[in-house]
Image (cartoon, helix red, strand yellow):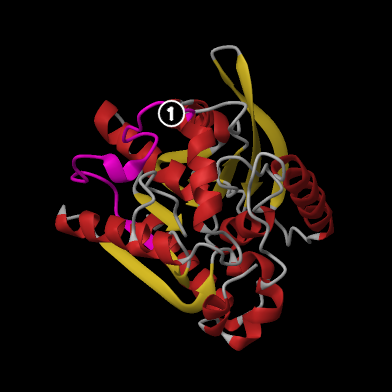
Amino acid sequence: MTEPQALDRLDARLVAEATLFRVPLTVESLPVIRQSLDARRAEQAAATDPGGVAVEDSSVDLAGRAVPVRIYRGTADRSAPVVLFFHSGGLVLGNLDTDHARCLALAAVAECVLISVDYRLAPEHPYPAAFEDCVGVTEAVLADPGAFGVDGARLALSGSSAGAGLAAAVALALRDRGGPQPVFQLLHQPMLDDATATPSMREFVATPGFDSESARFSWDGYLAGRPAEAYASPARAESFAGLPPAHICCSAVDPLRDEAIDHARRLLEAGVPTELHVVPGTCHGFDSFAPNHPFAVRETAAQVDALRRALDR
């Protein structure tokens, strides 16, 4: 049951929708939630007008293993900037349909090519599977941008929730490995810290959208008993120096709030240009289940504007 005090802190226009999104992740509930979420998102994706964006399902070969991707072309320019996008789902849910509407909007308004990655899910595929898929596809694009019809010198990383955590992990890995670097990271409600010990994680035990119990379940499935490292849990990175500029968004009523704020603080302390938005009166995933809410419209516009500026020639 959702905590009454959490609902009291939500914008009144979100309460009705938010109360429908409170199903804790457990071993028993995971298959049911997956089936329901995948079916709902597939139906929504099929009904969404691409609005002039060319959408193509494809795959990227990583040492003989094909990683499914969905390519959104918001422009026909063969030297367009490119965004690598990693979907939400707590590392245990989701696919290419999960954030379809967000991907369409980013590609169209930012006039870029967006490549969404269908990474492997835990607990069937624990760390480093999802990370390897995401960093592998990103490196493939950077190695041969012409094959994707993009400008590899203007590559940004983006994701939502667990996908935003993966984007942060990919940014760390690319910095550490040298070579071509992304120019920007757009992290929406990021899942970054396996320690799950922040004040917001302790407070929001039963909140709509996502709660701390579900976060702990997700981390347990992803790590599968092995110690966390920075590419699994970016909060564990020793240094944030040399990372690309960032735009970070989190919700006020969200167990992941404080780790997002701490991530922004550490980036700023490392000299990385960073913009942080803490959206009042909202919970995790608010823009997904209430996309027309004024806060969702405003935040989406802000993210697209930040992305456009970062990818400008």
Which quadrant would residue 153 be assigned to in this image?
Answer: top left
Q: Name the residue under label 1.
A: 139
Residue ID at (72%, 58%): 52
**SS assignment at label 1:** helix
Q: Is residue 228 magenta?
A: yes
- The answer to whether any part of residue 178 appears in the image is no
Q: In the visual, does 186 lie left or right of 18?
A: left
Residue 27 place in picture, x, y as percent = 66, 39
Q: In the visual, does 153 lie left or right of 93?
A: left
Q: Is residue 235 above or below residue 6?
A: above
Q: Give the range drawn in magenta.
A: 224-248
Q: Label 1: few (<14), some or many (≥20) within 10 Å?
A: some
Residue ID at (34%, 53%): 197
Residue ID at (61%, 16%): 65
Instruction: For the N terminus, give its image quadrant.
Output: bottom right
Which quadrant would residue 313 be assigned to in this image?
Answer: bottom left
Q: Is residue 129 above or below residue 116?
A: above
- The answer to whether any part of residue 248 appears in the image is yes
Q: In the visual, does 167 lie left or right of 1?
A: left
Amino acid on which disc 1 is placed: Glu
> Foreground: 152 or 257?
257
Q: Is the magenta stretch mostly helix, strand or loop?
A: loop
Residue ID at (56%, 34%): 148
Residue 112 place in picture, x, y as percent = 54, 52
Q: Does the magenta stretch include residue 203?
A: no
Which quadrant would residue 15 be assigned to in this image?
Answer: bottom right
Residue 239 place in picture, x, y as percent = 19, 42
> Foreground: 291 or 70?
291
